[in-house]
Image (cartoon, rainbow, N blue to C red):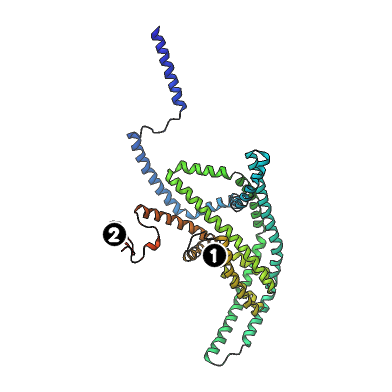
Amino acid sequence: MEKKTEEIQRDKEVKIGAEAYYVKRPQFGAKGTSKLRQHFNRGMTMFLVALACVISYFVILRLEEIAKIFWTIVDVAKPIIYGFVIAYLLNPMVKRVENYLYPLIEERMNHNIKAKNIARGVGITVSLMLALLVILALCNMVIPELYNSIKDMVLKLPSQINEASSRLEDIVFDKSTVGVFLQKVINEGMSMFQTWLRSEMIPQTNALMTSVTIGVFNVIQAVFHILIGIMVSVYILFSREKFSAQTKKVIYAVMKPERANMTLHIARKSNQIFGGFIIGKIIDSAIIGVLCFLGMTILDMPYVVLVSVVVGVTNVIPFFGPYIGAIPSTILIMLDSPIKGLYFILFILFLQQLDGNVIGPKILGDSTGLSSFWVIFSIILGGGLFGFVGMVLGVPTFAVIYYIVRTWINQKLEHKKLPVQSEKYDKNSYVTDEGVYIDSEEK
């Protein structure tokens, strides 16, 4: 009888132990990999390498078709892309409104979640309404004036060119070799410009107008995509913490902890660089456009709205932007009045000095951390590869790459116990074969 009792007790303990074991989650591969599994893994690795080589070969052969498929996917996903872009641009404003309203609503409701949702909803609504009001106001002010300026330019430009040509022909040069040469250069230049205007610019303008007429459907489609993107941005802004947490979860799941932490650090730094640069540059360009409009209105110059829009838009491009916008605007104003063109040059120089020394540093600060050489390099490279978008986004993109490379190099130097400051590696400093840094001052 006692033996049966002991067996029943033992069975009960085994049962309880099994249940307790299976309640706790077991670990995969706790005892290591078997030899059969090791051989299988080696064969699978060789198979995957061979498969990757075959896939790479066919990708190279079908690169054009793959590119078409990729751009088709991008075209289909445009509303989602627009939604992410709109959410990214509106997020700072939403945060400001939310941080201001949340304490006030929480005091009255005594409910954190509801207060947070209400504050965020109000922040998103206010941000969207302000953005739409600003866009509508700009379109209402700029588009009619822009149309009138372009129409006047098209109507007056031929007569202005002829008048400028006749003025140059009336200039009396001396009979010296230099005077005759200058007269020929001016005549040839005006002739070439008029030929280019008749043979190139006017047909291109007609083709552009035809494209605009044909592209009405594309404009409607783009507006439809933007409207869907606005709705997508609302969902993204409401659930930004959830999306951030899910992304962080995936990164920690597929990467080692040290690589995941570095990836998250680079993502935060990229957000800091892009956010500070893009939003700051938009604000800076808007201020420059408004100042240009006010200055040209006071100076009574022609094509005020058209030139102000050109100067404001091209100011988004760092370094080269002011010159890209000022050169054609100066030519356009000089055709109407040479003296006003000269005044415009002086005004633009003053405006760009104001932007470069006062407005720009106040708004942007040192958001990229790049020297002037690397800014020029990134603009040229980005513009050559991706056009206007590359010129605008080339600087923050290269700033992120520069930061990653600098961080990697500094970590290597710190591991070797060498200084990370660039000024420490002057012509009188060196590192011995044993890896010891010798400073020029210490030596």
Mark 2–mark 1 Cα distance, whole angstroms, equals: 42 Å
Label 2 sits on residue: 432
User: Is residue 433 shown left or right of residue 3?
Assistant: left
Q: Is residue 276 left or right of residue 120?
A: left
Front residue (pair 18, 77): 18
Residue 220 at x, y = what percent? 67, 55
- Mark 1: few, some, or many residues within 10 Å (few <14, many ≥20)? some
Residue 338, image x, y percentages? 64, 79
Q: Position of residue 281 (x, y in %)?
A: 58, 61
Estimate how packed mark 2 is, as few (under 14), some (14 to 19) or many (20 or more) residues with alpha carbons within 10 Å.
few
Q: Nearer the viewer, residue 338 or 211?
A: 338
Tag 2–tag 1 contact (CB < 8 Å): no
Query: Seen from this angle, which residue lies furthest left?
Result: 433
Residue drawn at the location 38% of the way across and 32% of the way down: 30
Q: Is 177 situated above or below 398?
A: below
Viewer-side residue, 353 vs 229: 353
Secondary element type, mark 2: loop
The x and y percentages for residue 256 are 42, 43
Q: Amino acid at mark 2?
A: Thr
Going by the numbered disc 1, the residue's amino acid type is: Pro
Q: Quadrant of residue 426?
A: bottom left
Q: Residue at x 67, y 39 (%)?
A: 109
Is residue 208 in view from this perspective?
Answer: no
Q: Which residue is mark 1?
A: 318
Residue 303's place in the image compared with 74, above or below, is below
Residue 17: name its quadrant: top left
The residue nearer to you, when weighing 214 against 303, is: 303
Please tell me which residue is depicted at 63% across the width and 88% down the height of the picture.
170
